[in-house]
Image (cartoon, helix red, strand yellow):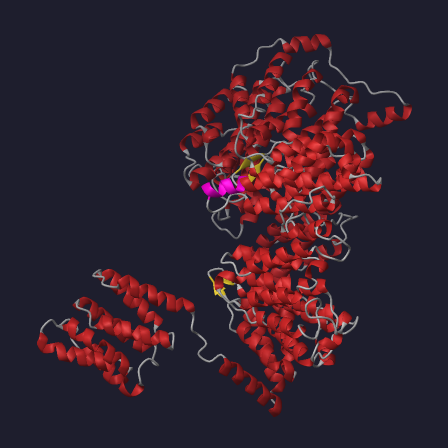
Amino acid sequence: MAQTDMDSGEDGGGGGEPEVIAKASVLGGFTESTEIRALISSLPVVHENIVTLESAIERFLVIMDRYQEQPHLLDPHLEWMLNLLLELIRSEQSPPLLVHLGFKFLYIISKVRGYKIFMQLFPHEVADVQPVLDLLCRQDPKDPETWETRYMLLLWLSMTCLIPFDLSRLDGHLTSDPSQTREPIMDRILAIAKSYLMVSDKSRDAASVLLKRLGDFLDWSLTTISQASDQTMGGTVILDGALQSLAQLFKHGKRDDFLQYAPVVLQCLDQCHVAESSQAMLRKLGVKLIQRLGLTFLKPRLMFIWEYQRGSRSLAANLSLSQSGSTVEAVSPDMETQSQEEDYDIPEEVENVIEQLLGGLKDKETIVRWSAAKGIGRVTGRLPKELADEVVGSVLDCFSFQETDNAWHGGCLALAELGRRGLLVPSRLPDVVPLILKALVYDEKRGACSVGSNVRDAACYVCWAFARAYEPTELKPFVTQIACALVITAVFDRNINCRRAASGTFPYGIDIVVAADYFAVGNLNNCYLAISVYIASFPEYTRPMIDHLVAMKINHWDGVIRQLATKALHNLTPQAPDYMATTVMPQLLPIALGIDLHSRHGAILASAEISHALFKLANQNNRPVTELISSDCVDGLKSIHQRVSSLLACYALSFPLGFGGELMRPAVSSLIENMSLSKMPFKDDPVITVSALAALCEQYYQPQPGMADPQMQEVLVSQYIAGLKSTEVLTRCGSALALGSLPRFMIHGKLHQILSGLQQSCSQREVCFTEARRDAAKAMAQVCVTAGVSAQGSSDSVVCEGNVSAVYRALLDCMTDYTLDSRGDVGAWVREAAMTSLMEMTLCVVGTAPQLLSPDLVNGMMCSLAQQSAEKIDRYRAHAGSVFVRLLHSNNPAVPHIPHREELLAIFPTLNWNAPSQAFPHITQLLRLPQYQYHTLLGLTVSVGGLTESTVRFSSQSLFDHLMLIQQDTAALGQFSDALLRVFRDNLRNDSHQFCVDLLSLCKEEIKKSKDTQKLRSAIAVFCGLIQFQGEVRKKVLFQLLLLICHPFPVIRKTTASQVYEMLLTYDDVIDPDVMDDVMTSLSDTNWSVKSETETQLVRSAAFRFSPLPQVCMCTLPVIKLTMV
């Protein structure tokens, strides 16, 4: 089961997940055997060249990785691949690099197939022991390039140790000369295995596999564990190797041989406090070793009489008996033998083992909990019934809401292990099933997210295990509860892994399994809005699904889940309309007025959706909605917005920055919209919101079809136009959006007034009102599209000849908005809205009265779009390009007066505008067209001078490619040069930023009358940096520096002179070149630390020579006289 809390990305503004694209593994065999044989055979040739070598390795990896999910397909081919590689390795002509390359290929194969299978194919004759051992001894354990060689040699050596002879017999090959030290092969193998247990690479794992074949190193292992510390990297590596080897020994060794050592090893682990280590891998290995010790303490047996056994474990027996129609009975052991086996004494160390395993279930790491759960299952399988039941009870204690999510997760894993091993007797199911049902919906909020997805995933694993472990008759009382919980998890869980786990473990209903399969539940929108409707058509699941949404999902911490839950309730209403109206609605209304923000938000949205769904049902039967919804609920719905508004106002007094307003406003807006669409009797209700405004006006402010209530029309339009002049940016935004959402009959007779207000709002370039300009640009197109187009109509009612030019001018003016603030290029928001509005406006005008579009308007629009499509921000460049192409390819009818239409159609096919590599080669082709050359070059200038590496590279390259094409065309090159100079001329000295002006003012104010030398020195550095800005800023900076160079404090005068000297070296355009040498000499030679009046005139003269502006000298003269005296 997947344990990670990882979900797919959500699209559509966070409303769901992308469709899952699945590619089933349909490999039928190892089809690349010929290519692999050729690759291995070519290794003696390719290893000499680094390029061909890397290519061969990469190709081998690609081929082998294809079989990661079906490694068994390699089995018929493993032997010949191994033989070919060993032939290279054993050859005396093979250089060391080729030998290492052969072992690298062997490791890649073993990684795919698994070392336990692959190592069995290694030759393990007596003659192989000495060469393998000698080759391993020649390896450098610290060489990071050859670890695959050491890893495979250790595995090979572990196989050679299986020869059916005592290894001491091989010692006869050693010299018998007594003068030489004789080291037995067994000692050599043990020494080298011990040394590799202390390395940090994968050879450590192979060394532990080797040592499981050997038995004489327990003392060394225990000593190593006692002396090593997990606080150092080296100590961690040593502990890892020792614990791995001990676990392998107790797993594969004979119980009778190791029983006497088990208490000593357990005591050593307790003294070393491995369970308290900060390293998760050490804790996992400690748990693994402890469970092996527990199995050593307990006698192995086939099964206890109390164990639950479902049928036969033999597939052949099941198939043979199923054909005859007879039932399979469980095989049970002899009663007398079983009774005798249950009477033996349980060692007291077992209690310590179980206690540590239960503690491992609560560990913070999944790998430790999983190992502890398997240990609980294995050890419990060797305990008598009474003790096993106590273990089950201790596991159930993990399911307390006082425990953490780690304990719940570990408890689920342990229950699954106990269940599938037949150790959880059916009499325990009434205690276990309610806890599993709680685990299936476990979700605990922590900060801005929640924990519990691993618990729910593990609970699905428990259900999977139970469905396969128990007879249907045992689970029958719980099937409905489990089925409903699994369906709810499969459809409504936020985590994709949990939904898939639940869909794969569903034990009831083939139709539902097909509808909610592994791939169908991958999309969150599909689960909530489609699959849930189908499953709710089965009566067993309808009310449980509705109750779960109301109880668990409309108050969820994730806003996307709350919104999807309310939409799901809307879709489920036709399945149980009476239940929704009589039970769910009365539950939601008190929650909608509660204190919890998320619950209030979800309840309001749910009330709105359910009310609208009930209206649709009533309308189908020609009945008013009030016949389905009680009068108390209608009154409650009507009072929600008033109570929420007062609640928000109350919070606003305590929380000036706002409390829930950005959630409540859209929720109440949705409520009013749905109430209006449902034709609720709320005609005198004064509350209006943007999204609900159109529906509200249609229902309540239209006495006759197509005619507005004059009084309400005047009130609304005047109120929103006045809001466009508010000092609050949100008020301006809301007013603009409200005007854009007005229905046509409310605009009739007020169009000129509305457009004038919106145009005026667009023209105000204050930084703080950027969002208002964006919304005004959007609203302008919305109003025009809603009002309609008529060439000869009234400018107060429709878009016509009298107002179309003003609208286009306002939108084109928005295309030049490059406002900057701390958030960056916020003017891009306005430009994007203007591009969208131009497209909508143009398509609307072209469809009705194309003669309104003059050549000048179309030319200005297309040139502005061309400029935006050449600029540096990918998102806005892509949007401009898509709008440009959309208008260019529009044929119903075509947009008139587009300059160079035929050339443009040839230039712009379908392309990815987000990718600079694809966009800029097409954009630069516009430079050949005179109408677009200037604006395209202006946009390219921004991109070439940008900061993003890919944008700068591809825009520059495309521009250079264009210049290479026209370098022989004198006329084209002249046009390009003229356009470039025009861009330069139009933007000459356009580097005056509000930032430098504000910074200069703040620094002046900060050092005013200050005597803090440190602060004054910092200000000098700032002023010298600001000198790079030309114009008025530079004049003001020079004035401040002249004041500081004549400051009363000598240290300030000296610091100023020194930094000004460095500044003039950096920026050589500050001083007239004719006097530069004199000024530099004065700055360097003058003693700025003088205090006597005799040298005052010299200092004053030096200060005058420094200033390039006579007026600055005259202004500073009185100050210099005062400060120098």
Give the farthest residue toward the bottom. 970
> From which residue to which does the magenta span run?
647-655
Q: How many marks?
A: 0
Asked whether residue 1113 appears in the rendered view, the answer is yes
Q: Is 59 left, or right, of 731 in this rendering?
A: right
Q: Nearer the viewer, residue 898 or 506?
A: 898
Q: Is residue 763 above or below residue 407?
A: below
Q: Nearer the viewer, residue 701 or 570?
A: 701
Give the main secondary structure, helix, strand or loop, of the magenta stretch: helix
Q: Position of residue 900 (x, y in %)?
A: 71, 81
Q: In the rendered image, which quarter is residue 133 located in?
A: top right
Q: In the rendered image, which quarter is residue 639 located in?
A: top right
Q: Position of residue 57 (x, y in %)?
A: 63, 57
Q: Is 726 left, or right, of 87 in this rendering?
A: left
Q: Residue at (73%, 11%) from the top-left corner?
A: 334
**What quarter of the picture does the C terminus occupy?**
bottom left
Q: Position of residue 1 (x, y in %)?
A: 66, 36
Q: Residue at (72%, 55%) from the top-left corner?
A: 37
Residue 653 covered by magenta stretch: yes
Q: Nearer the viewer, residue 196 or 691?
A: 691
Q: Position of residue 669 (x, y in %)?
A: 64, 47
Asked whether residue 11 appears in the rendered view, the answer is no
